[in-house]
Image (spheres, rainbow, N blue to C red):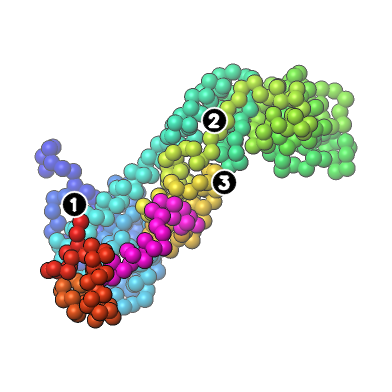
Amino acid sequence: MDSGAIKAHRLLWVDLSEHTEPPDLTNSWEILVVPCLAEAEAILRDPSVMIGVFPLRQDLLNQLPALERFLQQHGTREWIALVEPDLLWDPRVREILRHWCYDFHSLPVDTYRLEVVLGHAFGMAELLMHSDVHCNSLDQKDPLTGESPPMDQIRRTISKVARVAAPVLITGESGTGKELAARAVHEASPRAGRPFEAINCAAVPASLIQSELFGHERGAFTGAHRTRGGRVQSAHGGTLFLDEIGDLPLEVQASLLRFLQNQTVQKVGSDHEEKVDVRVVAATHVNLTEAVKEGRFREDLFYRLDVLHFEMPPLRERDGDGVLLAHHFFQAFARDRNARVKGFSASALEAIRQHHWPGNVRELINRVRRAMVLCENRFIQPEDLGLEDALENTLPQASLEEVRAEAERAAIVRALRACEGNVSAAARRLNVSRITLYRLARRHEISLQGQAAIKS
């Protein structure tokens, strides 16, 4: 082949019976023939081999369990089975075709038809591969997945606040990814590579939060059998992330304020302070300004934390990011998914675009992970995501009268076509008189001449 020729697509031909010779395909295909699953495993280490063919003959039925395990392990490829016609009634064969195959081809091989199927399978595999590559490239360049203008602004803000050591306050609705943003601040700062300690202030009982943050001396309280450092000491040289800071008890807020002012901590039960070097990044979904007015949050602590402030946008305001995130999480949780599930249907992606996402990214993660496990089709549908109602908003709203009229018009047209334009026969089919049919046809602008042509 000369250097200007089109590169052939690589096709794995797993001939377990050694009785199925590959057909003479066009130069578009480079066929890699292997006689066993072990050799096929070795070939599939090459990601450029995206589709495979295998025969299903009567003498291979005892190998079906091993074949099914193999297909399950390599479900990201597109597989075409070559099946002896009699085997199509075997339940075991039908299950393999339904769960693991892009398509099947009855033996003997029809070269032209097989090549058409192979072309379609390769195109689908390439689309799925490019989706994976896009998500992986996003992971490598930026932990914050998203290409919408609000996320571009967040990245610019993070790059600015990461350069300095002042406290950062991240606000936003629950599930918007505030901890991920805090980690991004840490990783972009000079403290990257040093400890990143995270604590959810709302998840720790009020009686233990002081000890969890600052540590305690042995015997300081019941159960304190040994001296222990807190999260602040563990974060020395790095970043301390205080999630849901708005739920921090008032008595602990005073200790946190002292730490922020002096960069010193005092363990519970101790009479001396320790010097630490920690940057604080806090996050909350609570409106701290309102909390200060209501006396639930110290005003002096609020101003200490609110030096550098940005808000994470809700998913409903991140146009297009929902679909991108869905693909991202589909890859991130690939090990959990039903192996035959290849991705999202077009209607599922549209449902993701239309859904309001009150639970933000956290809700999206939950819906995608559940769908990946429970989906029984090759592509996730809106109902697998629990979003079948989301598409209703995209449909034109019609009155009951309009729906009835459209149904009546469609019934008349179908009857006329079935009766080849014979008005009397169509009237009998619809169980109405010829006069009634003429009247209905005029109402719906249907011509009764010829083959029931419809006026445009």
Residues at circles 2 and 3 in contact by the CB criterion of under 8 Å: no
Q: Which residues are magenta?
A: 386-412
How far, Cα to Cα, is label 2 from label 3?
22 Å
* Mark in the foreground, 2 or 3: 3
- Foreground: 317 or 312? 317
Tag 1's secondary structure?
Answer: strand
Identify the mark nearer the N-term, 2 or 1. Answer: 1
Q: Quadrant of residue 33?
A: bottom left
Q: Is residue 82 left or right of residue 352?
A: left
- Please tell me which residue is depicted at 59% across the width and 18% down the height of the picture: 164
- Foreground: 410 or 308? 410
Residues at circles 3 and 1 in contact by the CB criterion of under 8 Å: no
Q: Which quadrant does the C terminus fall into?
A: bottom left
Identify the mark nearer the N-term, 3 or 1. Answer: 1
Q: Which quadrant does the N terminus fall into?
A: top left
- Please tell me which residue is depicted at 52% across the width and 46% down the height of the picture: 357
Label number found at residue 184: 2
Percent x, y of residue 307: 64, 21
Q: Is residue 308 above or below residue 124?
A: above
Q: Is residue 139 above or below residue 265?
A: below
Percent x, y of residue 315: 51, 40
How many badges with numbers are in the image? 3
The residue type indicated by label 2 comes to Ala
- Main SS category, magenta section: helix
